[in-house]
Amino acid sequence: MATKLLIKNIKTLVQVREELTEKVCGKDMAVLPCIDNAWLAIDNGLIADYGSMDDFPGITDWKGLEVIDAADRIVLPCYVDSHTHIVYAGNREGEFVDRINGLSYEEIANRGGGINNSAQLLRNTSEDDLFEQSLIRFNEIIKLGTGALEIKSGYGLNVDAELKILRVIKRLKELNIIPVKATFLGAHAIPPEFKGNKEGYIDLIINDMLPAIAKEQLADYIDVFCENGYFSADDTERILMAGKKHGLIPKVHAEQLSHSNGIQTSVKCGAISVDHLEYCNDADIEALLKSKTMPTILPGAVFFLSLPYPPVRKMIDAGLPVAFASDYNPGSSPSGNMSFMMSLGCIQYKLTPEEVINASTINSAYAMDMSSKVGSITRGKLANIILTKKINSYGFIPYSFSNNHIESVIINGLVF
Ligand code: NIG
Ligand code: FE
């Protein structure tokens, strides 16, 4: 197993950042630093060095060095997917057909479907089975170029089942393939046994779930689905503040199906990201500009549920950073293909290829507090990279939508 890898004759080395960059905002999102005709050296799973083939390195120590000739292919840092729900049981294909036949997402949820349908399935699935089902998706998205991942709970909705999901996330993390961050999303929906007693369920989250999760150190973040019919802005604040007491940093689902004051609440609670944002208004943009919260767009959910487009162009033009994530889940985005998310960003929100690549790498890394480790080609960062097939430019990836332009994915310096 080679610990040293040299990739030569790279047509374009994309997203090269000399300095550690936390995130890119506004007009800077249109700038994507690249080196044409480049080489990249990897040592011990980390990016050791890079440069132009005009200054090809004089290598003194060839022992254990593997050389890959990129033969005019493009290299990018792996995508960072900062919002997923890949630990779930079964699927919701039946509801997909219900929606084709005219029912709305809300109508399906009101009939006991939706998130509660997934919770019912998950409660009846063993931890090992859940792990096996989730591992298939985990491997699948790495092959599609994802090199760091956030995963949420939220399909358990009782103490045992939420712990079961978080333990599965821990097992995925402990595979030590790509970095994984865990988010506790007990406040994803009100389970049937608490119907008409939302307060009772919030008490369960705060008094029972949170202490158990903190005791086993199972989560990095706390999330709430802030939405009409789910959790109000006041509920959200209460739950986030309780999570913070246990050391969990807020990340919020907000303004997806209606305007629910989730962005303002997220900013107030110091959330690291606020996600969805279809109903984000001008006052929300102002609040985000004064904050450190990363606005995160989930193009797959917008597409799958035919939701109104979030005002992404307006947000970037106002000077905000924007991150992209897949929201991979059985109900609103059954895909974790970040290349496709970028196509949707270009086609539906009129972002440029440079903007969607920044949104899907460095800015998404910020949304899970990993921009010092992944999200760009920078010396010392993890060597999690994508080697494309023979394509003319990085813009071809979002342009030629839904085709797979990835030839191989290298994780920690090894071909995955
Ligand atoms: O991010 N919006 C809330 N949660 C998920 C959807 C969950 C589901 O339908 O299963 C989302 O879109
Ligand atoms: Fe989500």
Image (cartoon, helix red, strand yellow):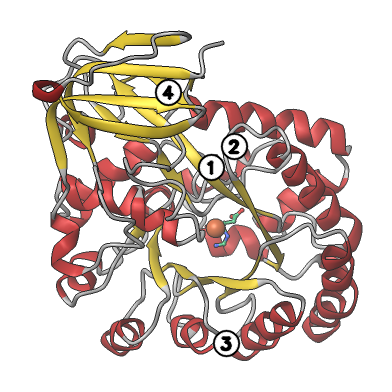
| Quadrant in the rendering for residue 205 | bottom right
Disc 3 marks a residue whose amino acid type is: Ala
Task: Kindly report the distance in space between the C-alpha atoms of the residues bearing marks 4 and 2.
Answer: 30 Å
Residue beneath disc 2: 93
Say if mark 2 contacts mark 1, CB within 8 Å.
Answer: yes
Q: Which residue is mark 1?
A: 96
Residue at mark 4 to residue at mark 3: CA–CA distance: 41 Å
Reading the image, the residue beneath label 4 is: 409
Tell me if mark 3 has few (under 14), some (14-19) or many (20+) residues whose alpha carbon lies within 10 angstroms of its own. Answer: many
Question: In the rendered image, which residue does mark 3 sit on?
Answer: 233
**Of the pair 162 and 71, the residue shown nearer to us:** 71
Q: Position of residue 52 (x, y in %)?
A: 14, 28
Mark 2 vs mark 3, foreground winner is 3
Q: Secondary structure at mark 3?
A: helix
What's the amino acid at mark 1?
Phe
How far apart, in angstroms, are the residues tagged by discs 3 and 1?
A: 29 Å
Q: Which mark is residue 201?
A: none
Q: Amino acid at mark 4?
A: Val
